[in-house]
Amino acid sequence: MPKVVIDPVTRIEGHLRVTCQVEDGQVVDAWNHATQFRGFEIIMRDRDPRDAWQFAQRICGVCPTPHAHTSVVATERAMGIERVPDNARIIRNMFEATHVGYDHILWFYLLNAFDYVNVPDALNASPTTPALQNLQSQLRAVVESGQLGPFAGHWWDHPGYLLEPDQNLELVSHYLQAIEIQQISNDAQARIGGRFPMVMSFIPGGMQERLEIEEIQYYIGAMERVKDFVDNVMVPDVLALAPVYIELAEQGQGVGNYLSWGLYDDASQEPANRVLPSGMILDRRITDVQQPDLNEVRMFTKHSWYADDAGQGRHPLDASQDPQYTELPPIEGETLPSGKYDWSTAARYGERNLPMEAGPLADMLVAYGSGREQVVSLVDQTLADIGAEGQPQVLMSNLGRIAARVLREKVNVDFAYQWAQELLDNYGNGDMQVYDAVDVPDSGEGAAGWSAPRGALAHYMRIEGGRIGAYAAVPPTNWNLSPRDDDDVRGPLEQTLIGVPVEDPERPLEILRTIHTFDP
C-alpha cells in the first residue's frame, strides 16, 4: 500500500506537507501537516488592546487586511463598542473589496491554474492573432532555454491535462494579464489604506482618516478595471474549464458542514445581514441555513504539537498555547503519522464537535441557501452553463470550490461601486464622521467573525486590568487544515482527500489539485 508524501506543497502561502495512503488507485487515508509554529496569541499577552490589530495582520502574508479588520472588531466588542460610524463601515468594506479583488485573481491564475493548464503544450497551438503568436514565440524561447523558472518542476507529462493546445496558450496569456490586474487592486488598497501589505488606518471605534475624493475616484477607476477583467476573462475561463474537467464534480465532497461568518456589512452592521451573510449548513442541507455562534467554537490538540490538555474542547480564549513539539513523521518508509503531527489545532463547532469547511464555497452556499438574489442568480446560471441545472449539490466538490471562488470575486466587483457611492452620498449629506472615541475598560471580552478570502476567520480578546489578558485567532486554517480531533475525526482537507483517484503515485497530480482547492 503506497505512502504518498507531498512536501513541500508548492504554490501556497505558508508551509504544508500532506501524507496520503493510496490503495487500488485512490486515497484511503490522509494527514495534513502545517509545519510552522505561529504563536501570536503568546505575543499578544499584556499589550495595549488598541494595538492588537497591528500585530494580528502579521499572522498571514496573504490576508493581512481581514486579520486587521477582524481583530479591531474583536477589540471593539471587548471595549463595549457595538457599532462604528457608517463611514467607517463603508471604508472597511472598500478595503476588503480591494483585498478580495487581488486575492481571488492571484489564487485562480497564479496558484491554481497550472494544475489544469499545460504550459509546454501551448507550443503545439496554432495561434491566429499577432498577440498570441508573439506570446508563443516568447514561450518557446523560455522552454528551449531549459530554464522554465516558475514553470519548472511540474508534472507536465501527466495524462490528467486535458485542454487543447490552443486553450492552453489562451490561458497562459490570461495568466500574464492576471499578474497586472491583481496588482491594480493591490495598488488601490495601498492608496486608500496607506500601504499594502499591512494597512495603516484601522483604529478601535472606526478609521483613523476619512478618504478624500481623489482617493475614492482612484478606487473606482481601479475596481472598474478589475471588474472588466473578471467579467470578460475570469468568469469565461472557469466556464471553459468546467466542462473539460467535469470529473472534478465527483471528487472532494468533504465533510458536508459549511461555516461562514459573513462578508461586507450593510448599514445595520449585523452579520446575518451582510452581503454574504453569516450562516452554517450542516449535513449538506443547503436550504437549512442556521446562524452560528462565535462562542460555540471549540479547540482540540490531541494530534497538534501542543500539550494534550491545551485544547480538550475549550473555548478559544481558554485554550492554552503550550507548545509541545515531538517530531515530523518521516517521509521515507511505510511509517504513517500517529500521535502529534501538526502545528494547526483542530477547531470544531458546537456540542457535536463538528468539523466545518470554510472558504468561498461555504460563503456562496450560505448566501445561496439564504436566498441572496444576486448569488442565487449567479449560481443557477453557472450550473446551467456547465450542464447541472437545478443541482447545487454538485458544488460540494473540487469543482465547486474552484467555481465558488470565481463567483465570489464576481459578487465582490459588482458591489465595489456601491460602497464608493454610499460614501459620496454621506459626504454630500454632511456626514464626515469616521471615528468614535472610547476609553479602554478595565475588563471586557469580545469576539468577531469575518470571511477572509480563505474562509471563516475569528478573533477573540479578553481584557484584564486594561491590558490583553488572553487573545485567540481562529483562521480558516484551523478549520480546513485541522488535524484529527480528540475523537480521531479527520479535519476537512483530510476527509476531502479520501476517495480522490491517483493515477500515478509518483506524480500525484490529483492530490495536489484537491489540496489547492482549499487555498492553503
Image (spheres, rainbow, N blue to C red):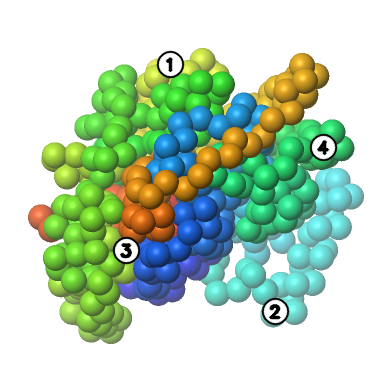
Q: Which is in the foreground here, disc 3 or disc 2? A: 3
Neighbours of disc 3 within 10 Å: few (<14), some (14-19), many (20+): many
Q: Is residue 38 above or below residue 445?
A: below
Q: Position of residue 40 (x, y in %)?
A: 42, 65
Neighbours of disc 4 within 10 Å: few (<14), some (14-19), many (20+): few
Kindly report the distance in space between the C-alpha atoms of the residues bearing marks 1 and 2: 50 Å
Kindly report the distance in space between the C-alpha atoms of the residues bearing marks 3 and 2: 36 Å
First in residue order: circle 3 vs circle 2: 2
Residue type pointed to by label 1: Gly
The quarter holding residue 482 reads: bottom left
Q: Label 3: which residue?
A: 344
Q: Label 4: which residue?
A: 212
Instruction: Using the image, tell me which numbered label, if any, was put on residue 371.
Output: 1
Q: Which is in the foreground here, disc 2 or disc 4? A: 4
Residue type pointed to by label 2: Gln
For the point 82% across and 63% down, which residue is it? 137
Q: Position of residue 86 (x, y in %)?
A: 62, 26
Residue type pointed to by label 3: Ser
**Helix, strand or loop at mark 4:** loop
Return the residue found at the far left: 487
Kindly report the distance in space between the C-alpha atoms of the residues bearing marks 3 and 4: 42 Å
Q: Which is in the foreground here, disc 1 or disc 2? A: 1
Q: Position of residue 371 (x, y in %)?
A: 43, 16
Return the residue found at the far right: 130
Instruction: Using the image, tell me which numbered label, if any, was put on residue 147.
Output: 2
Q: Which is in the foreground here, disc 1 or disc 4? A: 4
